[in-house]
Amino acid sequence: MVGNLQIISIAGGLLRLSQPLGTNTRASLMFLTDGGPVLGKAEMLSPLSRTQQAFRFLALDQSNQRNLQLGIQSHFNQNFDEEQWIAKYRSALTHQAPPPRVLKIILGSVAFGILVVLSVAHFLNLELLK
């Protein structure tokens, strides 16, 4: 039977299967991790749903246990790197320096100048109409 590994730990995990196996069924599981292939004996626990079934490892030799630990550690390191990047990004967004004061002064002066020019033009237009 073929299934998908959804959750894994040193003690066991969760499989997605087309149909669950009987509780206490013993099976050989094989899957790949970033640490290498893992092959071990497992016991199926009570199904959680029609397609999800938990299991616990009964036997993992030293090599497979090391591959499993390396795979889990690799996953945590990958998540840690992503979390660090997200934290830096959020920090950069919340700690952006406000626009320089000089830029505010220049933009305010330009806006005031435009207002003066438009006011003068409006005044002259009214004087010319009289």
Image (spheres, rainbow, N blue to C red):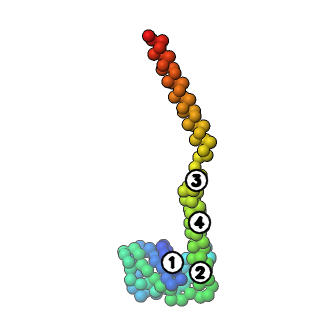
Residue 8 numbered tag: 1
Disc 1 to disc 3, C-alpha distance:
40 Å
Residue 119 position (above or below residue 43): above
Q: Give the class, few, some or many, for how many residues have Cα within 10 Å of label 1's Cα (few <14, many ≥20).
A: some
Disc 4 to disc 3, C-alpha distance:
18 Å
Disc 1 to disc 2, C-alpha distance:
10 Å
Residue 121 appears at what percent x and percent y?
51, 20
Residue 106 appears at what percent x and percent y?
60, 37
| Image-based side of 49 in relation to 33, left or right | left
Residue 108 position (above or below residue 61): above
Q: Earlier in the sequence, mark 2 or mark 3?
A: 2
- Residue at the spot of label 3: 96
The amino acid beneath tag 4 is Gln
The amino acid beneath tag 2 is Gln
Residue lying at 57% horizontally and 73% vertically, measured from the top left: 76
Q: Earlier in the sequence, mark 4 or mark 3?
A: 4
Q: Earlier in the sequence, mark 1 or mark 2?
A: 1
The tally of labels here is 4
Residue lying at 38% horizontally and 80% vertically, measured from the top left: 47
Residue lying at 62% horizontally and 76% vertically, measured from the top left: 35
- Residue at the spot of label 2: 69
Q: Give the class, few, some or many, for how many residues have Cα within 10 Å of label 4's Cα (few <14, many ≥20).
A: few
Q: Give the class, few, some or many, for how many residues have Cα within 10 Å of label 3's Cα (few <14, many ≥20).
A: few
Q: Earlier in the sequence, mark 1 or mark 3?
A: 1
- Residue contact at pointers 1 and 3, CB within 8 angstroms: no
| Element on which disc 4 rests | helix
- Residue at the spot of label 4: 84
Disc 4 to disc 2, C-alpha distance:
22 Å
Residue 82 in sight here? no
Circle 4 or circle 2, nearest the eye? 4
